Amino acid sequence: MRYDLAVSGTGELAPDDGVPGDDGPREIFERGGASWYGIQFHQRKTASGERFDMTAMTAAHKTLPFNTRVCVRSLVNGSEVLVRINDRGPYAQGRVIDLSRAAADRIGLTGLGIKQVALTVVDRDGMRCGGLPVEPGDAQAPVAQAEPQQRARAPVPARRKAVVPARKRR
């Protein structure tokens, strides 16, 4: 038996990053383990100075500049999420990125703890993430906001010492 494999059309096949359902070649910046962090860091300040929001699509990376947009692709199931770098880390061996809880949920990471991913820096118009074209405003830095103001409280009247009459002795 003889099997001939032929490619229709002109040119050669584009390089494949090994993930089924890929929509074409992309420049992989880094591969490795991804983990996530959530409630224990919620509303604490990140290395960039903004407050961590576990419901936002953000991540921590050791070297990428803050506000860099990164498409994180699971090498386990092929799902993708667009995140913005706003923190530093992870500092565990073999890990390349720490995702917020919301981003980890989007690619099915929360149940596994650590998952193998491929990172692509989104730095050109027309790039895609999660099967959708990336718009210029997607995962951008939030508008600088003033610190939330404390609720105005009514002035509390000064406490007076209660005068208790002396007890009569029998």
Image: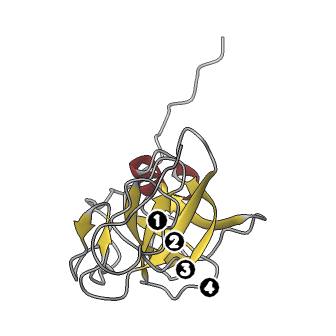
Q: Quadrant of the C terminus?
A: top right
Q: Using the image as rendered, state which of residue 56 and residue 150 is in the foreground.
A: 56
Q: Tell me which label, 4 or 3, sits earlier in the chain.
A: 3
Rendered residue at 43%/76% (across/down): 26
Position of 145 relative to 105 (above/below): below
Position of 37 relative to 108 (above/below): below
Q: Which mark is residue 119?
A: 2
Mark 2 burial class by Cα count in 10 Å: few <14, some 14-19, many 20+: many
Q: Which mark is residue 36?
A: none
Q: Which mark is residue 63?
A: 4
Mark 3 burial class by Cα count in 10 Å: few <14, some 14-19, many 20+: few
Residue 21 picture location, percent across and down: 37, 54
Residue type at mark 1 is Val
Residue type at mark 4 is Thr
Rendered residue at 65%/17% (across/down): 169
Residue 27 picture location, percent across and down: 47, 80
Cβ–Cβ below 8 Å for labels 2 and 3? yes
Q: Tell me which label, 3 or 1, sits earlier in the chain.
A: 3
Q: Is residue 21 left or right of residue 60?
A: left
- Residue that carries the numbered disc 3 in the rendered image: 29
- Residue that carries the numbered disc 1 in the rendered image: 72
Q: CA distance from mark 3 to mark 1?
A: 10 Å
Residue type at mark 2 is Leu
Cβ–Cβ below 8 Å for labels 2 and 1? yes
Cβ–Cβ below 8 Å for labels 4 and 3? no
Residue 38 picture location, percent across and down: 52, 52
Mark 2 vs mark 4: in front: 2
Q: CA distance from mark 2 to mark 1?
A: 5 Å
